[in-house]
């Protein structure tokens, strides 16, 4: 994960005004641009074409503890209180980052540098949307002026003028060894205990995760890996959050947690999965088995009902038709859910209400989280947590940080989880975990 030297630390929130200048430029390689940036580095791409990559920090908003959402909202309001920005809406200033699964998260291996919540407003950013590309430079400083930031924009534009429009995504690093942090026997015991709790009425559902430690043959290049995700998982999101030079959290998650635009909220219930078939006929048969499964249907209904209940206080909720979401190596049951908000809300309000959904946590929420803490022999960190962006208006979009990994040099830790309900079979659930590692694993192996 080598890149240019560190930039100076950004000022504290409340110590400046935000000035941003943007210009449209010829398209260039976002991968090459990202590789040249200093930490913190961020990347965000959606299936519908929005793509952001940024380096350095004009400002950083971070929080720890149970009041982390309150702290984020308050500091972001201060940051965005005095903004001088030009450019189109697509290239407006945004804070990009995420949160840990648990509010009391303390950074520990492999999550060094990842606090309970962290969002970065990039110092330099490329934006691609609607087949157009913009370069933005931002400064948050008491001395920032439109003239000084415009001069920096000229300088940065000159430095990227020679970047190629396209750049090959490079070689996969190769895998030397892998090690599951939960053995098959430990998994079986954990699932059996969870099923017993569910049948006793203490629990309705819990999502148990596993981690895979991977030693690579060569240091990972995450921008290269993200570029390969573009080709192999075009129907998924792509993200990178790299707070320091040491480690980055990245992946191609399939699941939107929430998108908010004004008074409109869109989310989805994604739960229950089977593999893809080798032929169209086998694929269709597997999809039919997914739709016909009482166990997976029950699991998916729990997620749908809970999301609807948590959105209800915000406004009018509409639940769509359940269907199949097909990815390159797996297919899921999916139910689209929308809401029209009654009052002004921030996207972080909705994120706080939804996280963790039963698709990554369980029901009842606190009991499920206790089971997770007691059962999993590793730190989830930011795995299965909200990752995304928000702007000055409180609009934004977040995904659930699954199908993901945290990596540094020639080491990576991958994560996968599976929902446990009353009739779950440990061997079947173990088998379901494998395909969930593959999106990242395939892009690491030669």
Image (tube, rainbow, N blue to C red):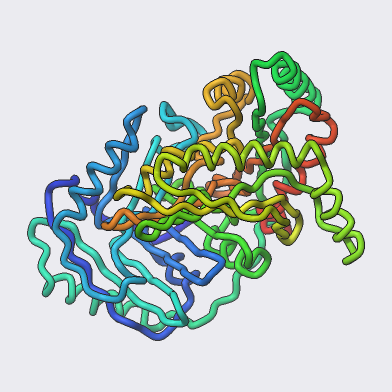
Residue 113 visible here: no
In this orientation, which residue lies closer to the viewer: 156 or 145?
Answer: 145
**Which residue in the rendered view is the most extreme toward the top?**
200
> What residue appears at the point 75 percent right and 47 percent down from the top-left corner?
273
> What residue appears at the point 38 percent right and 63 percent down from the top-left corner?
54
- The reply, left or right, for residue 34 in relation to residue 445 is left
Residue 109 x %, y %: 51, 33
In this orientation, which residue lies closer to the viewer: 145 or 192?
Answer: 192
Q: Is residue 110 above or below residue 11?
A: above
Residue 335 x %, y %: 64, 51
Residue 156 x %, y %: 28, 74
In this orientation, which residue lies closer to the viewer: 324 or 41?
Answer: 324
**Which residue in the rendered view is the most extreme toward the bottom?**
26
In this orientation, which residue lies closer to the viewer: 319 or 156?
Answer: 319
> What residue appears at the point 47 percent right and 72 percent down from the top-left corner?
30
> What residue appears at the point 44 percent right and 38 percent down from the top-left corner?
353
Residue 236 visible here: yes
Q: Is residue 217 above or below residue 151?
A: above
Residue 197 x %, y %: 70, 16
- The reply, left or right, for residue 264 in relation to residue 309 is left
Quarter of the view holding residue 328? bottom right
Quadrant of image for the C terminus:
bottom right
């Amino acid at each position: 994960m080598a890149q240019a030297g560190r930039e100076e630390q950004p000022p504290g929130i409340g110590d400046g005004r935000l000035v941003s200048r943007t210009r449209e430029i010829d398209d260039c390689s976002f991968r090459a641009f990202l590789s040249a940036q200093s930490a913190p580095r961020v990347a965000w791409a959606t299936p519908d074409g929005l793509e952001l990559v940024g380096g350095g920090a004009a400002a950083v908003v971070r929080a720890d503890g149970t009041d982390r959402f309150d702290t984020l909202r308050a500091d972001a309001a201060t940051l965005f209180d005095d903004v001088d920005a030009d450019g189109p809406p697509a290239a407006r200033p945004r804070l990009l980052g995420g949160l840990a699964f648990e509010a009391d998260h303390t950074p520990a291996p492999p999550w060094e540098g990842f606090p309970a919540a962290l969002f970065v407003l990039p110092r330099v950013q490329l934006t691609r949307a609607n087949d157009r590309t913009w370069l933005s430079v931002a400064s948050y400083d008491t001395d920032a002026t439109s003239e000084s930031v415009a001069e920096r924009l000229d300088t940065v534009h000159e430095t990227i003028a020679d970047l190629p429009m396209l750049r090959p995504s490079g070689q996969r690093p190769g895998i030397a060894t892998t090690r599951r942090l939960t053995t098959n026997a430990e998994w079986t015991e954990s699932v059996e205990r969870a099923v017993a709790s569910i049948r006793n009425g203490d629990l309705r559902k819990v999502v148990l995760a596993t981690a895979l430690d991977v030693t690579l043959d060569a240091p990972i290049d995450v921008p290269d890996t993200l570029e390969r995700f573009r080709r192999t998982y075009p129907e998924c999101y792509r993200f990178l959050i790299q707070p320091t030079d040491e480690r980055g959290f990245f992946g191609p998650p399939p699941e939107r947690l929430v998108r908010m635009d004004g008074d409109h909220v869109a989310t989805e219930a994604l739960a229950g999965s089977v593999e893809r078939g080798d032929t169209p006929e086998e694929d269709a048969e597997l999809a039919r088995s997914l739709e016909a499964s009482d166990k997976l249907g029950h699991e998916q209904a729990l997620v749908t009902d809970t999301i609807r209940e948590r959105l209800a206080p915000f406004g009018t909720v509409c639940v769509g038709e359940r269907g199949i979401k097909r990815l390159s190596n797996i297919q899921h049951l999916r139910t689209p859910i929308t809401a029209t908000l009654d009052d002004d809300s921030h996207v972080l309000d909705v994120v706080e209400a939804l996280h963790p959904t039963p698709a990554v946590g369980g029901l009842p929420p606190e009991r499920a989280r206790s089971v997770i803490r007691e059962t999993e022999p590793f730190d989830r960190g930011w795995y299965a947590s909200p990752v995304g962006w928000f702007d000055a208006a409180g609009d934004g979009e977040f995904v659930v940080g699954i199908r993901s990994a945290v990596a540094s040099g020639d080491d990576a830790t991958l994560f996968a989880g599976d929902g446990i309900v009353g009739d779950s079979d440990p061997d079947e659930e173990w088998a379901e975990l494998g395909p969930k590692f593959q999106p990242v694993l395939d892009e690491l192996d030669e």
